[in-house]
Amino acid sequence: MASTDETAALVPDGARKAYDGLDTEASKNFHDTRHAVQSTEMHQTEGGFLKPLIFGGLDGILTSFAIVAGAAGGSMPVPVVLVLGFSNIFADALAMGVGEFLSSKAENEWILSERRRENWEMENYPEGEIREMIDIYVERGMKHEDAKLVIETMAKYKDFFVDIMMAEELNLQVPEEDHKTESMKEGVVMFCAFASFGSLPLLGYVLIPLAFPNLGEEILFTSACVVTGMVLFLMGCVKSNFSASHWFACGLETLLLGGACATVAYTIGQFVDKLIAE
């Protein structure tokens, strides 16, 4: 039966926890135990959808709140805010989702075309490719003899070596075979994140009047500010799980940047409203 330390070392984020705490003994236990039960070290894989999730969520909530703030600054009635807000959010969410899918798909197809070129060069002139890789490793500090031994050994396994060349020469990560499916998932995540987070500042204008019909527009705008601030801070805290930054610092950074965007929208709304009134 595994000991407590061995069990802790088996958790998927054991290596990350050891690094966060700079615990060398925990890192050693993780790798030793992992090697005994599985040859592949597990890393965080959620980061693949982190970009569309965080970017879509932030863009959605900031776009929506910018509309709310601009409308409040321009003294627009609540029905106008709702019509502009919801129509804009879902149209933008669809555009962002499609754009994420197409851009990710195009990037992956380009990378695969570069891999085909590298594979062709390896088949027709392997000596030149091997020499280039040796030079790269020598530039990074390896002795020529050691670099030559390493590269010539890897070159015996062509597909593996081509992937290494992609990473070392071109700084490109070869996508998986089902990259179109992954691109589609990224687009869906972008759409859902944009639409769901973008709806939050507007929901207060719908739900609060149902319970308190006599509240003024200023109270509704204040509630939208509170909800948006809380969501921005929480999104920053979630983002800290995939970075080395402290959760409070990430949350505060996201809140301040979002607040700056909203302030600009509110100020411009006020300015345009006064300009029209004159």
Image (cartoon, rainbow, N blue to C red):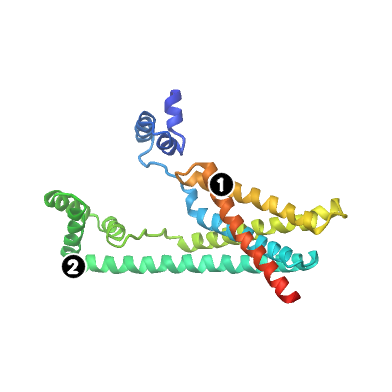
For residue 52, side relative to residue 197 (left or right): left
Residue 207 placement: quadrant = bottom right
In the depicted structure, whether residue 39 falls above or below residue 204: above
Point out which mark residue 269 bears.
none
Callout 1: SS: helix
Label 1 CA crowd tier, 10 Å (few <14, some 14–19, many 20+): many
Callout 2: SS: loop
| Residue at (58, 49) in percent of width and height | 235
| Residue at (50, 44) in percent of width and height | 241
**Of marks 2 and 1, which one's residue comes earlier in the chain?**
2
| Gap in angstroms between the C-alphas marked 2 and 1 | 52 Å
Circles 2 and 1 in contact, beta carbons < 8 Å:
no
For residue 185, side relative to residue 270 (left or right): left
Label 2 CA crowd tier, 10 Å (few <14, some 14–19, many 20+): few
| Residue at (39, 69) in percent of width and height | 110
Foreground: 212 or 26? Answer: 212
Q: Which residue is mark 1?
A: 251
For residue 9, side relative to residue 272 (left or right): left
For residue 59, side relative to residue 177 (left or right): right
Whether residue 152 is visible: yes
Q: As shown in the figure, which amino acid type bears the numbered disc 2?
A: Tyr
* Quadrant of the image containing the C terminus: bottom right
Q: As shown in the figure, which amino acid type bears the numbered disc 1?
A: Gly
Residue 218 placement: quadrant = bottom right
Point out which mark residue 125 bears.
2
* Quadrant of the image containing the N terminus: top left
